[in-house]
Image: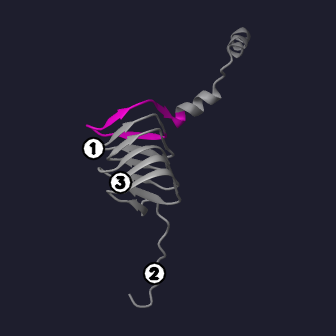
């Protein structure tokens, strides 16, 4: 109570710092250093350091990059999620995705190709040269 020190609020990526409300339309490239919630429309490119929340009314025709991405609206474009990509029941995503973790709820729509970061890192470690396979077989 009295005399106690208040804790400073730490920067939490779940705190939304930018909101694009319903009825707002933006064309171009958007870069944000914090988390963002989108209930309006974006056409172009969206690059976010924090999390991206796309509400039911949100409509994006854009390539999207963010930490964790939750889609309840519509996205048409490629998506890169450094952490988790979640498409909820009302969500619709048409485009290719590059993700670490993917959650698609019943009723959600996803149409495109998916690349896991784990799969890509394993491909980089495996030899792509056929001659390397022949060399290994001869030494065995």
Residue 18 falls in image quadrant: bottom left
Q: Could you tell me if the residues under marks 1 and 3 are in contact, i.e. CB atoms within 8 Å?
A: no
| Residue 138 colored in magenta in the image | no
As drawn, the label of residue 40 is 3
Q: Secondary structure at mark 3?
A: loop
Q: Secondary structure at mark 2?
A: loop
Residue 25 in the image: above or below residue 103? below
Q: Residue at x 31, y 44 (%)?
A: 88
Q: Reading the chain from its start, which is encountered first: label 2 or label 1? A: 2
- Within 10 Å of the Cα at label 2, are there few (<14), some (14-19), or many (20+) other Cα atoms? few
Residue 110 in the image: above or below residue 2? above
As drawn, the label of residue 6 is 2
Q: Which residues are magenta?
A: 99-118
- Mark pair 3, 2: CA separation: 36 Å
Q: Reading the chain from its start, which is encountered first: label 1 or label 3? A: 3
Q: Which quadrant does the N terminus fall into?
A: bottom left
- Front residue (pair 113, 10): 113
């Amino acid at each position: 109570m009295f005399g106690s020190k208040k804790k400073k609020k730490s920067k939490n990526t779940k705190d939304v710092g930018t909101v694009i409300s319903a009825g707002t339309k933006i064309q171009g490239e958007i870069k944000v250093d914090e988390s963002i919630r989108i209930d309006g429309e974006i056409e172009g490119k969206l690059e976010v350091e924090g999390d991206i929340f796309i509400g039911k009314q949100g409509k994006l025709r854009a390539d999207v990059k963010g930490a964790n991405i939750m889609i309840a609206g519509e996205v048409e474009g490629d998506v890169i999620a450094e952490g988790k990509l979640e498409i909820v029941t009302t969500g619709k995503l048409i485009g290719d995705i590059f993700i670490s973790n993917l959650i698609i709820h019943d009723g959600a729509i996803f149409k495109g190709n998916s690349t896991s970061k784990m799969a890509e890192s394993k491909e980089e470690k495996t030899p792509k040269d056929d001659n390397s396979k022949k060399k290994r077989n001869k030494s065995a």
